[in-house]
Every structure is written in C-alpha cells, then in structure tokens.
C-alpha cells in the first residue's frame, strides 16, 4: 500500500498494509505523538456540565488560598467595573419622535434619580441591605470569572427610598435539577408540560429559559448553617405574570445550545496549582536549610568502637560509646577561648565542623514560574504584568502593546457581563419608577400606547444606554493627552468617548467647570485659561503680578 504523500509502501510487523497517513497532521491517528490523543467531539452541555462542579470547586479553592488567583479576580473587578459604574442613558430620540436636546435633558434627570437610589449607602437596591449597585456589578464580574456565570434574582421589598425593587445574588451551584446530585446534574428531565430541565434551567421547545430551579439553601450547609431546607428547591420563573423579569442569568455563550457557563479559570487550574505546590515546596526546603545550619562530625561510634575493641562485644561497645559521648559533652561544655568577648571554637580530637548549605533554588525556577504565569495571564485575558504585578522587565512599548490587547478583552467582557447586568437592573427599576410616576416619559412621548408591541418598543428606545466603568490604563499621560488632542482636531474621536475611556462623564465634567467658574468669579479671582480666561503670555507683567497678588491674598 502506498502512502498518499510520500508514495512509500507502509507495512506493519506482520507484513500487512498500514493505514495511509492523514492529509492533515492534526488528524493523524497512528503517530506516536498524536495516535493516543482521541478527544471526542461533544456538545457544550455534554462536555461542561459533568465536570462543572469539580472544576469550579477547584477554582474557588485557589481563589481562597492562592495570591495570584485572588489578585486575578480582584483585577477583573477593578478593570471592568472599577469603584463605580455610571449610567449613560441614550434614548433613541429619532425613533421616539423628539429632539436630541429634549432627550438629553430627560436622560440627565433619570440618571440622577437612578444613582440616588442605586448607590445609596443604605443599600436599598439589595434585599439584604449589604451592597450598592456598583458592588452588585463587581460581584457578578468576579463570579463570572471563577464560575463562568452569575445569577441575580429580583425581589420586592418596600424601602424608605420609595421603591420596592431590589435584588439578591445566588451561588451558581444552587441552581440545579431537583433531586439530582453532583455529576449527574447534566442529565435532562422532561416535565409533563413538555419543558426540559437541564442543570436546573427549565427550557421550552426552542431551548429558551423559562424558569430556574434554585435550592433554598446551599447544599453544603446541611447540618451546619441550614436545616432540611437544603433538600428543597424553589421554581422561579424568568418572567412574572406582568412580564417583568425575575431572574438575570449572566454568562458568555461559546457554543450552540449551551445552557450554563463554565469557569474562565478552567484552562489555567492545573498549571496554577502546580506552581502553587512548587512555591510551597521551595519555601519548606529553604526553611529546612536554615534550621540546621551547622553540625559536628565525629568519628566516634559503633564502627570506631569495634576497631578499638576488635570484637563484636555489643555490651562493651555500648559502654565505650557512652563513655566517649560523656567525654564530648564535658569537653564542649567547657571548651573555648574568649578573646575580647569573642569565643573561638575548639573541637574534640578527630571531630570536624560541617556546614549544611541552605537549599539553593533551581537556576531556572524563576524562568519556569514566569512561563507559567504568562500562560495563566493569557487564559485570564490579562497581560503578564497585570497578572503578576511584575513590571521589572517591561519596556514602554511592550507594556503599551500588552495593555492594548488586555483593553480589548475588558471591553468585550464588559459588554457581555457588566453592561448586561447593569442594564437589566436599571430597566427593572425604571419599570417601577414609571408605574409609580416618579419618572415621567419625555415630553411628546406616549408611554402607554394602544398595544403591547408598541409599548415594548418604546420601553427599549427609552432605556437604551451605555455604562462608564474603570478607565483605561495609561502609561504616559502626556503622550495620551497629545494623542487625544490630535484625535479631536482631526475629528477621529469625540470628547465624550475619550472621557468615557478614562472613566469620566462629560456632563459631570462640564458641570464641574461651570461651578468652578462661578466660584472664581464670586471671589474676584482671574479665570484660568481653561475656563475662558486670557492666557498669561498675552497679559502684561503688571497684570500677571496683580493676578498673583490677588491669588496670594485669597489664600
């Protein structure tokens, strides 16, 4: 039989023709390197769900005990969400039939009302009164990284804020098929109404989620923090009877028909755990090396006693050894010469001092650890510098390139998780605010049309929004400012986009300039150039001196 690529006849040990080589090396089934590597092609749920609990349990354990894993999750929250997540309401005014000015004025009022409720330190947005809106979004970003998904459940609890809408979070492992345990949670249960329950998510004929089965208590709290409620589930429909959403399920879909998310740390767990174990081992060996720094080597012992006595007299040798040990103890108890307070060691005859060298780490240990960290960082969507906190070997150009790549990940993850969570939470508050009348539609917009389809469209157009999170990391602020200046001059970027990328709000910035200008004018101080004042270079020396004197007197 001829090989299709080389034309050589390939026979096995018994002279039988061997299968021909594959057209692609990646599909080779007989080579030593790839022959035993035969992973099956599986659906998303078949490959993920049976291993979900074990992989995510390991990820959570590493976050609790490994500094790099903990730092990665913290970094995920800080760079995607930041300290606060700010609403940028952008009504689709062209479809609503109003002007941009009317839409902007209305949006500004809604933004203020929303954040006054959502960021209140009394945490009215949280049914447990523990978290603000921004803290909710941060938690979802961190949970999604560790477990691949996050769950928010809308609750109804009246508060002094005037609103009853609030939320609670649910650990992803609590969402499970009733009565099904552990690795069997990937099995599908068909309900009498034709819906299917897979991994706690009830799906309709289209595969869309219609309800979620949530344990009333965490399964590991049995006998500790919970009672028999551990074995009970609540069926929470995705929408209530009024069409309001009750469950927000956040995960990034990677394959068709995917029901649940999977830990983003899964691809790095093995290497991170191995690096963790190696670090512990290196530390233990170093401690052992310093604990036994010096020893005395003596020729006295059983072999020496045998040579002296010339016979295997166990009793005699034991007595001889004890006698020698007593003599050594007496000698070392009194030996030594002091010169100006310094004791010079004196050894017993034939004894030697040996020094136990401290454990010396392998020469390539740091390089090996750095290689593992680069793989981990790539799997987490971070630069090596962000993941490790090590900028010692980084040049400006390489750091800037790394930050650019990491920023693309931040924008994509922000849109898939943080923005989605924030928008759905905002819409649920907006629903209640409109019904209560605390928020009125823009002038000229009929919010309650004659049919539900139009109402759904108007609702979507009114609540169209973006969000401002943590700003982009800037390595050289001056160079970035010059680049922004050129971009504005050539109309390649807009000012609000630049500010949003830096984590700032255009309206808040301009309001701050107006207040600052008024304060300068009230105090009779000359206006700075950026507030419309004359440039100092265009003023006479006498005017500049007068300005400086007025400023000094004001101080």
Image: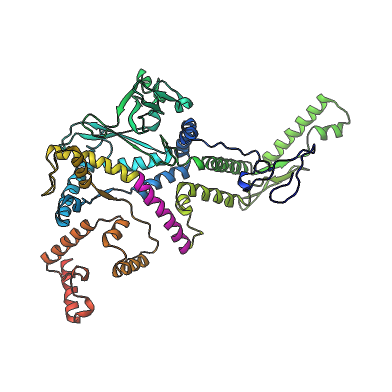
* Residue 316 picture location, percent across and down: 82, 26
The one nearer the camera, 142 or 297, is 142
The residue positioned 39% from the left and 32% from the top of the image is 172
In the visual, does 484 lie left or right of 433? right
Q: Which colour scheme is used?
A: rainbow
Q: Residue furthest top?
A: 228
* Residue 524 picture location, percent across and down: 12, 68
Per the picture, the main secondary structure of the magenta-coloured stretch is: helix
The one nearer the camera, 16 or 110, is 16
* Residue 63 picture location, percent across and down: 45, 39
Question: In the picture shown, does residue 531 fall above or below 419?
Answer: below
The one nearer the camera, 465 or 197, is 197
Q: Number of marks in the image?
A: 0
**Is the C terminus in the top left, top right, bottom left or bottom right quadrant?**
bottom left
397 within the magenta span = yes
* Residue 347 picture location, percent across and down: 73, 44
533 within the magenta span = no
**Is the N terminus in the top left, top right, bottom left or bottom right quadrant?**
top right
Q: Please state the extent of the stretch shown in magenta in the rendering.
A: 396-416
In the visual, does 483 lie left or right of 72? left
The one nearer the camera, 361 or 484, is 484
In the visual, does 504 lie left or right of 43? left
The residue positioned 18% from the left and 48% from the top of the image is 112
Give residue 236's quadrant in the image.
top left
Q: Residue furthest front?
A: 1
Question: In the picture shown, does residue 393 fall above or below 271?
Answer: below
The residue positioned 58% from the left and 52% from the top of the image is 367
Asked if residue 498 shows in the view, the reply is yes
Question: In the picture shown, does residue 36 fall above or below 513?
Answer: above
In the visual, does 260 lie left or right of 128? right
Give residue 33's quadrant in the image.
top right
Asked if residue 120 shows in the view, the reply is no
């Amino acid at each position: 039989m001829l090989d299709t690529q080389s034309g050589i006849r390939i026979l096995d040990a018994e002279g039988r023709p061997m299968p021909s080589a594959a057209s692609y090396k990646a599909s080779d089934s007989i080579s030593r390197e790839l022959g035993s590597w035969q992973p099956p092609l599986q659906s998303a749920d078949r490959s993920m769900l049976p291993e979900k609990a074990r992989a995510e349990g390991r990820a959570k354990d590493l976050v609790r005990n490994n500094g790099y894993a903990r730092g990665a999750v913290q970094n995920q929250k800080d760079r995607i969400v930041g300290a606060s997540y700010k609403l940028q309401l952008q009504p689709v005014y062209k479809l609503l039939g109003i002007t941009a000015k009317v839409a902007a004025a209305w949006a500004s009022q809604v933004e203020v009302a929303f954040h006054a409720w959502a960021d209140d330190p009394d945490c009215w947005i949280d049914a447990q009164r523990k978290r603000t809106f921004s803290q909710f979004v941060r938690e979802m970003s961190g949970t999604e990284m560790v477990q691949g998904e996050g769950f928010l459940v809308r609750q109804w609890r009246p508060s002094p804020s005037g609103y009853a809408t609030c939320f609670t979070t649910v650990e992803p492992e609590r969402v499970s098929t009733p009565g099904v345990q552990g690795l069997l949670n990937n099995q599908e249960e068909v309900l009498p109404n034709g819906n299917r329950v897979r991994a706690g998510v009830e799906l309709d004929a289209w595969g869309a989620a219609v309800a979620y089965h949530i344990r009333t208590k965490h399964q590991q709290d049995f006998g500790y923090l919970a009672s028999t409620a551990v074995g009970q589930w609540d069926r929470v429909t995705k929408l209530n009877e009024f069409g309001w959403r009750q469950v927000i399920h956040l995960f990034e879909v990677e394959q068709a028909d995917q029901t649940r998310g999977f830990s983003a740390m899964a691809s790095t767990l093995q290497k991170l755990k191995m690096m963790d174990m190696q670090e512990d081992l290196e530390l233990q060996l170093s401690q052992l090396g310093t604990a036994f720094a010096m020893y005395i080597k003596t020729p006295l012992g059983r072999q020496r006693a045998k040579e002296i006595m010339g016979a295997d007299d166990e009793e005699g040798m034991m007595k001889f050894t004890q006698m020698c040990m007593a003599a050594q103890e007496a000698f070392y108890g009194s030996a030594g010469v002091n010169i100006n307070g310094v004791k010079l060691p004196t050894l017993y005859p034939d004894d030697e001092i040996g020094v136990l060298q401290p454990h010396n780490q392998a020469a390539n240990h740091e390089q090996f650890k750095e290689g593992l960290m680069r793989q981990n960082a790539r799997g987490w969507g971070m630069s090596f510098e962000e993941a490790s906190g090590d900028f010692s070997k980084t040049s400006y150009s390489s750091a800037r390139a790394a930050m650019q790549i990491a920023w693309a990940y931040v924008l994509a993850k922000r849109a898939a998780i943080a923005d989605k969570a924030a928008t759905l939470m905002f819409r649920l508050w907006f629903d209640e605010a409109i019904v209560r009348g605390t928020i009125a539609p823009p002038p000229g917009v009929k919010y309650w049309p004659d049919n539900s389809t139009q109402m759904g469209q108007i609702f979507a157009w009114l609540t169209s929004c973006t969000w401002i999170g943590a700003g982009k990391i800037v390595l050289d602020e001056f160079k970035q400012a010059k680049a922004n200046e050129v971009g504005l001059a050539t109309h390649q970027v807009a000012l609000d986009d630049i500010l949003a990328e830096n984590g700032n709000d255009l309206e808040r910035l301009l309001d701050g300039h107006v207040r600052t200008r008024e304060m300068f004018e009230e105090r009779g101080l000359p206006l700075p150039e950026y507030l419309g004042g004359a440039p100092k270079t265009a003023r006479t020396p006498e005017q500049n001196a007068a300005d400086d004197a007025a400023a000094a007197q004001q101080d």
